[in-house]
Structures are given as C-alpha cells and as structure tokens.
Image (cartoon, helix red, strand yellow):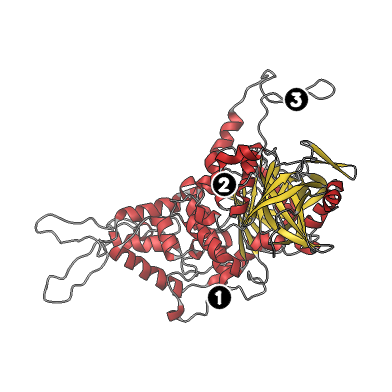
Amino acid sequence: MRSANLNSDPSRLGSVEDVNGSSISVKLADSTPAGLLFVHGEAYRVGQVGGFVRIPSGYVDLYGVISQVGAGAAPGPPELATQFGNRWLKVELVGQGRRGTKFERGIAQYPSIGDSVHVVTESDLKTVYAPEDDDGYVAVGRVASAESIRAYLDINKLVTRHSAVVGSTGSGKSNAVANLLGAVSDRSRFQSARVVLFDLHGEYANAFGEQARVFRVGADPTLGERELYIPFWALTAEEFISMAMGSVTGTALVLLQEKLLSSKRASKPGGAPHGLPDLAVTVDTPLPFSVYQLWHDLYSLHCATHTVSKNQNQTQTTRAYLEDGVPPVKAVGDSEQLLRPRFRPITTEAGAEKIYGGLYGDLPRPHLDSLESKLRDPRMQFLFRPGPWSPDTDGTTAADLDALLESWVGADTPISVFDLSGIPTAVVDDLIGAVLRILYDAIFWGRMKPEGGRQRPLLVVLEEAHIYLSPQSKSRAATASRRIAKEGRKYGVGLMLVSQRPSEVDSTILSQCGTVISLRLTNDSDRSQVTSCASDNLKGLFSMLPVLRTGEALIVGEAVNMPIRAIIDRPPEGRRPESDDPLVVVPKGEDGERVRSGGWTESVQSENYKPLTEAWRKQDPTAG
C-alpha cells in the first residue's frame, strides 16, 4: 500500500539507497522519466546538476542539491558502478524545513534508507527562498530554474561576513557588481548606507547616477566629479617615508622620525591646536606637517657647509655658509617653491679656510632627490598638496580629518567611487593600502561612536583584486586587505573582492569571504581556487561554472539560505559600467541602417588623431 501511494505522487523521483554523512545516493524509480517530470501541470527537468530535491522525513522536509548524475553517483567503488546502472543521483544535504515553517540551513537528522525523494516544486522553492524579513534581504535577480522566484541575499551577512564576485571576462561580472551595489545602497530602504568602491579602470563613474560621488585626480566639476585628495600626513610614518623616499634605515631613519615628531607636535589641524600632550604624539599620529618644509630642512642639514674652530681642544662650533654673491632670498631657498638653498662649496686647497660638508652625511642624497622629484611630480599633487588639507610651513591646515572622512563616507550619497585610472601605476598599491588603512583605523578607533563601524557598517569593494592581492604580494593594499578580512567583521568593515582571475588572489583573503558569487569561469585553476573556498559537500556544484550563461551566477555561502543558480538583474540603460565589448560589426536596426557609427563596417571620412593625442597627454579620456 505504501509503495502504491509513493508511486502515485507525481513529484517522486526515487528513494534513498546510501547515506554517507551529508552526501546521499538516490536510485531513480523505474517510473521516473529521463526527461521532463510533470507536477500539477508544471514541467521540471529530472536529474539536473544544481537542481534541488526534497526528502520528507517525519515532520521535517530535508532539502539537498544534486551534485552528480549517472553511474558515478552510485554508492561503492567506481569500478563497480556499472553493476548498479546509471539511474543514480548524488545529493548534498543543505537544510531542512518543518511543514508550514521557514527553511533553515543545516540538518538535525539524516534520512533513512528507503525514504522517498521528490523534485522540488515551485511552491517548495518559494518556501526555501522567501526571505524571513524583507528589511534584511535584497533581491539581486531570479532563480534560474524558476524565473518567477526572486533571488534574495541576506544583506547583513553579505556586508559584514565578506564576499567575492568572480567571473571570466565577458561573463557579466561588472554588471553584477553594479546591480549588487545598487541594491544594497537603495536610499528608499537603506538611508545611511556606506560603500567605498576602488575602481582601477574608471568603469563605474556613471553606473550609479546620483547614488554615488566620484573622486578622481583631475576631476571635472561639470560632470559632478570631486577632486581626489589623500593627505600625506594621515599616513603612518613608515607609509609616508616608503612612498615619498623609499627604504630608509639606520641613522637617517632616526633623523626623519625626530623631524616628523617635532613637526607633528607643533601642528594645528583645522587651524586649531590638536590638544594632545607631547608624550601622546607619536610619529604615526595623523597630525599635519609641511612636507615641503621637511624637504627644505633635510636638504639644508645634508648640504650646508660649515667651518670648525681652530682651537681643537674646544667644543666645535659650526654655522651654515650661504653662497657668496647670491641674493639672500635665493640663498636661503623657498620650501613652497622647491627652491634649494645655496651653500659655499667645500674647500680642498691647502692654506684655504676649511669648509666642510653637512653634519648629517648619513642621510643619503638619493632619498632627498626622490622626495624632491615626487613633490615636483604633478601626478602626485593629490597626495602632497591635498587641497584644504594642505599644511602651511607651521603645520596649520584649513580642514581636519573629520571633513575628509565626511567627504569620503558621509551620508549625502551611499556610494563613493575612487576612480584610480589617473594614478601612477607605481603607487596604486600603496595608495589603495593607505586609503584602506585610514578608513579602517578611523572605523576601528571610532567603532563605538555613531559614525563608527559598529553603528554604521562600511562595505569596501576592491575591483580587479588580483592585480594587487596576489599570494606573494607584500604591498600595503594586500596587508590592509588581509587585516580587514581577518578582523573587519567585528568592527563593522566588510570586504567585497571582485576579480576575473581568482587563482591570482591570495587564498588567505579569499577564504575569509563568507559568500561567493561566481559567474562563468572557464579556467581550471580559477575554478579550483573558488571551489576550495566552498564547503566540502557543495564542491560538486562548481562543475557547472564553465557553462553558465552571461549574467548567470552560482551563489553559495552565508548570504543565501541554500545555493542559488541565479540570473542577475541587468542594470537599466545608462546605469551600466563601461565594460561592454566594443563592436567590430555594428548591428543594423529595423530600417536596415547601422544603429550607431563605428566598427569596421563603414569607411572613415576624416581621420583626426589630434583629440586622441590631447586626451592621452591629459590622461583624461573625456578631454575635449
């Protein structure tokens, strides 16, 4: 009688024949068709990798994901698989739900041998994927196997438990990121969202409209862009010295630290004394000082010439000798204009007055020259002349770091796009690391304040993460990212990695991502890296990654109730990143005419490379 009832259920696929931890082997019933199964007038594909099954077990329904189909899914050693036939499914258990209640991840009991296994119908999927609380979930697309059902992500776990968006070039990765960030920063729902996106190629400047503020070196105010300023004095001493002068050690490093400490103690951020006791100020305290005055002082100490008293039994007396015949203004130099002071040359002739070189000969001249060249480089002015945060010679600034942080992550717009396409490649790693460290330190130390991470979490998005987060990388970007990946959850700083080559991303960082959104991946090493981040019982799902459609993603991890194969919503026209493939052949419209100019199909009427050259020189693709 029981068998007759089971066979009369149109959703039944077969029965449980083997249980091995969270993996079970299912034998398809003889009556189960090999193609489509019809349940209440709806058609469902039988035995699709990534499909779901339901196993009633008492008052609980167990849910699982099909990871393998055919003879290889049969229990026992592979060499005996042919004896069992090929009508087998291997299923990974992922969660359970009591009749009429919400689905939950994890299982409290295992199925028994002979338990019936059923295809998951659309009504079952609605139970599984329906969010517990609409306020805590965002819809990012549609379930691929049932497109009437929306795919939801838990925003709490997506942001604070870290995430990764990976996919080969052309898989729809940039559009997926734009859609995700647009959803989590919807002002109608999340009025004080905070997202910082590091955009290495300038793809996202127009992707978010009024939802985003765009920071760029050489910003165009008519386009709504803001000038990118990163005050050098907000860096730690080690960061500043490394970026400005290279590796400095020994006596020279001690000299630099002494100069930095004395300058910071006398500084006036925002035009007012900092209010800290001298003993509380360290070389790493973010207080302003004039880097131009620092260069002038160091140059003078290194290059000034001196005389020594003739009475060698007395204490030596020294004084700087400015060059004869040079006007005083030019002789003493000008720190702001980077005019070097002029000194009398060292004497070597016998009988002449002895003039010696600088007392601080241990400070290598190449370090001074490096600092001077960086200060003269117009591409580095965002760092050394940071607008309202530029210190004068005594360390006084017009604005303090509170204004900087408000401009970066203030509530007036939810997304901040740091367009780094105009930054010199040599300093991009250090720059990203410095900004990450500034943001993290501010959020960390202010975590209990209303603007801190505990009250208002911050999401940091790292585009093209493989460029600066390789396993061998010791850059500041990699160091700061590892710190956020390991510690950020507790303090309200979430990380989202975006990469087309996950195999080139440090596994230490990638393994901390609680949610993985993987679009099509065709490279074996990339798939292996992503698969290694998934729990063991879900690794079979990643075999479908090479055949995902453009814009289709496999979402696994903490932000979803159970793994989702979803079609990510495409952002509306005008809100898409500039990542579409250029068209070699422009398609024709209904009238038979090309829908736009360009491509290889039409002749060039008047060729003019002058505007291209101007844009190249200005490092601005929008330059007229």
**Residue 274 coordinates in the image, percent (x, y):** 52, 76
**Residue 426 coordinates in the image, percent (x, y):** 46, 47
Q: Residue furthest left?
A: 350
Q: Check whether the beta carbons of the residues at disc 3 and disc 1 lie within 8 A of each other.
A: no
Q: Residues within 10 Å of mark 1 (few under 14, many from 20)?
A: few
Q: Is residue 407 visible?
A: no
Look at 57% across and 53% down and name the residue there: 533
Look at 40% across and 73% down and name the residue there: 262
Residue 196: image quadrant is bottom right
The answer for how far apart the CA atoms under marks 2 and 3 are is 31 Å
SS assignment at label 2: loop
The answer for how far apart the CA atoms under marks 3 and 1 are is 63 Å
Residue that label 1 marks: 272
Residue type (three-letter) at the residue carrying disc 3: Pro
Nearer the observer, disc 3 or disc 1?
Answer: 3
590 vs 440, left or right, is right
19 vs 407, nearest the viewer: 19
Residue type (three-letter) at the residue carrying disc 2: Glu
Residue 159: image quadrant is bottom right
Nearer the observer, disc 2 or disc 1?
Answer: 2
**Residue 587 coordinates in the image, percent (x, y):** 75, 25
The answer for how far apart the CA atoms under marks 2 and 1 are is 41 Å
269 vs 544, left or right, is left
378 vs 178, nearest the viewer: 178
Which mark, residue 587? 3
Q: Quadrant of the C terminus?
A: top right
Q: Residues within 10 Å of mark 2 (few under 14, many from 20)?
A: many
Residue that label 2 marks: 464
SS assignment at label 1: loop
Residue 202: image quadrant is top right
SS assignment at label 3: loop
